[in-house]
Image (cartoon, rainbow, N blue to C red):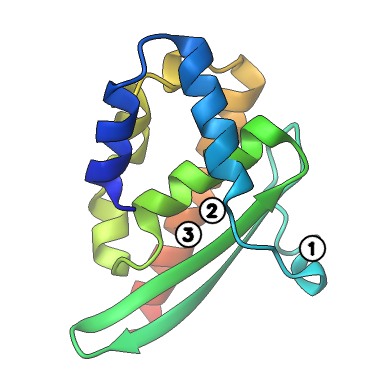
Amino acid sequence: MNADDLIADFEFLDNWEDRYRHVIELGKKLPPFPEADRTETNKVQGCASQVWLISELRQTPTGPIIEFQGDSDAHIVRGLVAVLLTLVSGHSPKDILETDILGVFRQIGLEGHLTPQRSNGLRSMVERIRGHARAALAAA
């Protein structure tokens, strides 16, 4: 699934409850997160729920990409992680930094329906992802 598929899926959902359920379903499809990576270092600060993010920089014939994995102990937040990873995982550090991630969340109708705590957590996750991308660019 890519960003366009994600946006198209959400366009078919008429109300917040349907979108909420869809986010939870996306979270259920995340691959298992390695237990060994559930560390304080990988934990995203600023989230009310526990959230872990890890990345791996890979070289491809077209240039470097970052593969992300993530998880949360809360269903809705795990779904938000899944949406985020759909938008950024497998993309170049430059593309990640140029993507208006929060703009996509507005476009699919999620950002305006999150509690202030979840909105802050989402911003913390986005900043962590951007930090991984900035570090990858600096290392290049």
User: 76 left or right of 125?
Assistant: right
Up/down of 127 relative to 91, above or below? above
**Residue 89: which numbered mark, if any?**
none
Determine whether the residue tagged by mark 3 lies in a helix, strand or loop: helix
**Secondary structure of the residue carrying numbered label 1:** loop
Counting the numbered discs, the total is: 3
Left or right side of 107 for 110? right
> Counting other residues with Cα less than 10 Å from the Cα at mark 3, is it few (<14), some (14-19), or many (20 or more)?
some
Q: Amino acid at mark 2?
A: Arg
Q: Residue at x 80, y 60 (%)?
A: 40
Farthest top residue in view: 15
Nearest the camera: 24 or 60? 24
Per the model, the C-alpha gap separating discs 3 and 2 is 5 Å
Query: Measuring 44% from the left and 13% from the top, which residue is drawn there?
Result: 112
Q: CA distance from mark 1 to mark 2?
A: 15 Å
Question: Which quadrant of the view contains residue 102?
Answer: top left
Q: For residue 104, say whether it is visible.
A: yes
| Residue hosting label 1 | 38
- Labels 3 & 2 near each other (Cβ < 8 A): yes
Q: Earlier in the sequence, mark 3 or mark 1?
A: 1
Amino acid on which the number 3 mark rests in the picture: Gly
Residue 38 image position (x, y, % from top left) = 79, 63
Single out the mark in the foreground, 1 or 2. 1
Residue 74, x across and y down, in percent: 74, 36
Would you call the spot at circle 1 few (<14 residues within 10 Å), some (14-19), or many (20 or more)? some
Label 3 to label 1: alpha-carbon separation = 19 Å
Q: Is residue 106 left or right of residue 77?
A: left
- Which residue was labeled with disc 3? 131
Look at the numbered disc 2 and give the secondary structure of its residue.
Answer: helix
Q: Amino acid at mark 1?
A: Arg
Which residue, given by chain and number where applicable, does mark 2 sit on? 128
